[in-house]
Image (cartoon, grey):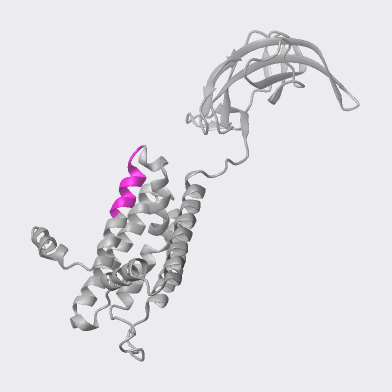
Amino acid sequence: MAARSDWQLYLPEQIRTLPADLAAVFATVALTAIVALTPGLNETVLRDAIGLPFLLFVPGYTLVAALFPERGPTTDSPDDQRGIDGIERATLSFGTSIATVPLFGLVLNFTPWGLRLVPILVAIGGFTAVTAVVALIRRRALPEPERFAIPYEAWFETVRAELFAPDSKTDAVLNVVLVLSLVLATASVGYAVAGPKDGESFSELYLLTADGEDDLVADDYPETLVRGESAPLVVGVGNQEHRPVNYTVVVLLQRVETENNSTTVLESDQLETFSPRLEHNETWHRDHRIQPTMTGENLRLTYLLYRGQPPTSPSVENAYREVYLWLTVREQ
């Protein structure tokens, strides 16, 4: 104990006298901000391991701690009506967090900052820190025997006695089974969080145009052109295949004939070919200009998407994805 007291003397008095549960709250807020904002760390299992308590337990815990600074009933005084017991405190902490956190999202949605990571961290972290300070002030206003405190040392001594000094061999076997069950449950939850199953795999192909403010919109596509005239378009590809993919986009201008819901390609010219490589969850845009090589009404400007190299004769039938526009191209 002397060694622990010696290093504690180097800490400021406010930190040395800070209750352990509130110190853990401040540490959780700080660690959540560090992990969520640090590149690399925010893609590891630490983000979920620290972020879930930060959202589902900590805000409610500090609010309950501010409302109920006094200790609850104990084994020495089971009829003591002051405060709430540990089970009630934990239940209220989860329930209050689940009720409070969505309110921050609702409010942020109507602010200029919106539902983004930093505003959410600031809002929930600030609320947690303020309520923790209120809880600390209210506890210190009470006589020390009446303050709420988590009996960590008593719990540790009880667990140590049960594990290393059981009353019988049966208790020893049960303790081993309990420890193994806890390890197995923790490992299962960790595996489920660290290695979530991939969702549906798909790729996106779409066409956009630039409006007067340089924003990309799915509107105002070219409809009528003159032979030799060009028109700007933006083709986009999105990778949701959960793996890197080499794509090929083939642009065709086709003269088609439709009869009885059947489309026949009478003439086809290849205008452009693009070959982007995209990582999972990456989006690619390419500005280009189309210049028709044939004239006529209801020509089909077709974009075909392939994973990998396209076949010798690209067509709608053998493409992975396709989009098209109808054009009328006049001689003059």
Name of the residue lying farthest toward the bottom: 79
Magenta region:
30-39
The front one of 182 and 228 is: 182
Give the quadrant of the C terminus.
top right
Left or right of residue 254, residue 35 in this image: left
Q: Nearer the viewer, residue 231 or 31?
A: 31
- Of the pair 329 and 207, the residue shown nearer to us: 207
| Residue 248, percent from left and from top | 61, 18
Specify the principal SS of the magenta part.
Answer: helix
Measuring 72% from the left and 9% from the top, which residue is drawn there? 294
Image x and y of residue 212, in percent = 50, 29
Tell me the quarter of the image containing the N terminus: bottom left
Residue occupying the point 46% across, 71% down: 170
Say whether residue 257 is left or right of residue 321. Answer: right
Q: Which residue: 29% across, 81% down?
A: 71
Which residue is at the front of the view, 176 or 125? 176
Q: Is residue 219 visible?
A: no
Q: Report if residue 135 is visible in the image.
A: yes
Q: Quadrant of residue 108?
A: bottom left
Q: Is residue 266 magenta?
A: no
For image coordinates 51% across by 30% down, the residue present is 282
**In the rendering, at what x and y percent does residue 83 appear?**
33, 83
- Image quadrant of residue 261? top right
Q: Residue 36 lies in magenta, yes or no?
A: yes
Image x and y of residue 221, in percent = 63, 26
Specify the farthest residue to the front. Answer: 169
Side of 239 relative to 43 (left or right): right
